[in-house]
Image (spheres, coloured by chain):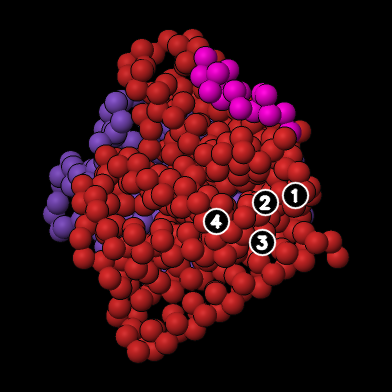
Amino acid sequence: MSAVHGDLLRVFGGILAILTLASAVGFVLKRRLSPDGGNATVDNLNDRIRAWWVMAIVLSVALLGGRLGVVLLFALGSFAALREFMTLTNATRADHATLVAVFFVALPVQFWLIWIDWYGFYSIFIPVYVFLFLPILSALAGTTRNFLVRVAEMQWALMVCVFCLSHVPALMDLAIPGYEGRGVLLIAFLVIVVQLSDVLQYVWGKLAGRRKIAPNLSPSKTVEGFLGGVASASLIGAGLWWMTPFSPLQAGAMSLLVTVMGFLGGLVMSAIKRDRGIKDWGHLIAGHGGFLDRLDSVIFAAPLFFHVTRYFWTV
Amino acid sequence: MGGAAFNDTFAGRAAARFVAFAVTAFARLVTAAQPDWRDVDPTSTAQRIYYANHVSHGDFVLVWSVLPQRLRERTRPVAGADYWTGSALRRFVGTAVFRSVLIERTPRAGGADPIGQMAEALDAGASLLLFPEGTRNLGDEPLLPFKTGLARLAIARPEVDVVPVWIDNLNRVLPKGTMVPVPLMCRVTFGAPVRIDAGESVPAFLARARDALLALRPRPEAP
């Protein structure tokens, strides 16, 4: 067994322990507070924990599957996220050809570029080429009503759901001296720290939340949840330095960066949801909502994490 | 006319089941269709006349794909005979796969009576899905004027619940004249049943049914 698989198995063991503990807590809470489904918070918590099991297993299988598994998983996640986002835009029948190109050309090409590790192209394909050709396609359809809104929304959807998210699998191919072949661990590190931060913010918020941090954007987020979640997730991130190319202090600083970005990303995505009058992006992940509800923080953290790592650690 | 004979063979029935499965699975994959049961019980096997807005060729498939298995098995769409008998393939899909009740949209002398055909299907235990606009709505109005068939059927079988079904977003998935569906999420909303009152006139019932359907729209249509 290679070193990377050994480290991966340690990570999976840790996740297994946390989820087992979470399920046990959920079981006790259910017995005590909601024996016949009377307590919505407890039932939602148990739904969330069950969905976490599924997500953890899927991510583990993908990471064990190596490059192909990871690229495919994030391409599919990107597809699901983009579908949720596009559903809420003003894109009309006139944008049908544009949408076909977005879903069936732009998205696969972006992940194919990640797969062949063509950094010079995947980092400009959507911001430059798609940015220019997407409005051209929609203009050719000849409907001018809401044109700027439609085009801007579609471009933004691509940036968020495809471009930013594709930086997660791209982490695998960073050429970091002394870290060869261990790129999947960097992905595991980012995803674990960001998601743990979301969970810990939720837990701190439920246990100690008093003051709302952004009442107009997200009524459930509190100052106590934010500070407690970010601080504890960053500490755990520092403790996970052994799976990264970073020192413990650097791992803590990187964790702080991605957890704060993740929190801010959650606020941005909440603003969009509030504007469109919805509570969740979708319904496919029981207890959580849609894919974007789960991925919003990773989406905002991934490009920064990628570029900071690339700038300071690659040759 | 070999199509009708094939449809009755074992192979024909097996093919029909497989196509039904494939079509509904594909519809779910593209649209992640979600049912929203409001004031109507999804677990009840009570016989129903569903009526829905008609925006796309995929409408029936979408409703079918979100119905629970037990309801799906007994729900038959009411469709235009002129279209669904047009070729052997359409006849296979229309009758063997969807088990449509095929009616003539433009009544002619000596033709079958559409209300009688639908009532007969109800009497045989089926639930029905009607598109009372009669044709696909490709304009900007949320609903076209209803044909009278829904009200006349409700008068003929007043004991059956008439359930409004709003199909949202499918017109963006597969607009008129396009071949490739784009993946956007769709929602199918089932509303509280309406029943015809004793002595209620056809226009009055249609207006009520129309309002009940429009009330299920999740948000004003995007401009």
Evaluate whether label 3 is on the same chain as label 2. yes
Which image quadrant: the C terminus of chain A? Answer: top right
Residue bounds of the magenta highlight:
A117-132
Closer to the chain start, of discs 1 and 3, is 1
Image location of residue A290, percent across then percent down? 45, 52
- Residue A118 is one of the magenta-drawn residues: yes
Q: CA distance from mark 1 to mark 2?
A: 6 Å
- Residue B95 is one of the magenta-drawn residues: no
Q: Look at label 3 and name its amino acid.
A: Trp
Residue to which mark 1 is pinned: A179
Residue to which mark 4 is pinned: A249
Q: CA distance from mark 3 to mark 2?
A: 8 Å
For residue A242, the mark is 3
Packing grade of label 1 (10 A; few <14, some 14-19, many >=20) is some
Q: Look at label 2 and name its amino acid.
A: Pro
Q: Look at label 4 and name its amino acid.
A: Leu
| Mark 3 secondary-structure assignment | helix
Image location of residue A132, percent across then percent down? 52, 14
Check the image and report above or below for B107 versus B26: above
Residue to which mark 2 is pinned: A245
Q: Which chain is red?
A: A
For residue B42, the mark is none
The subunit carrying tag 1 is: A
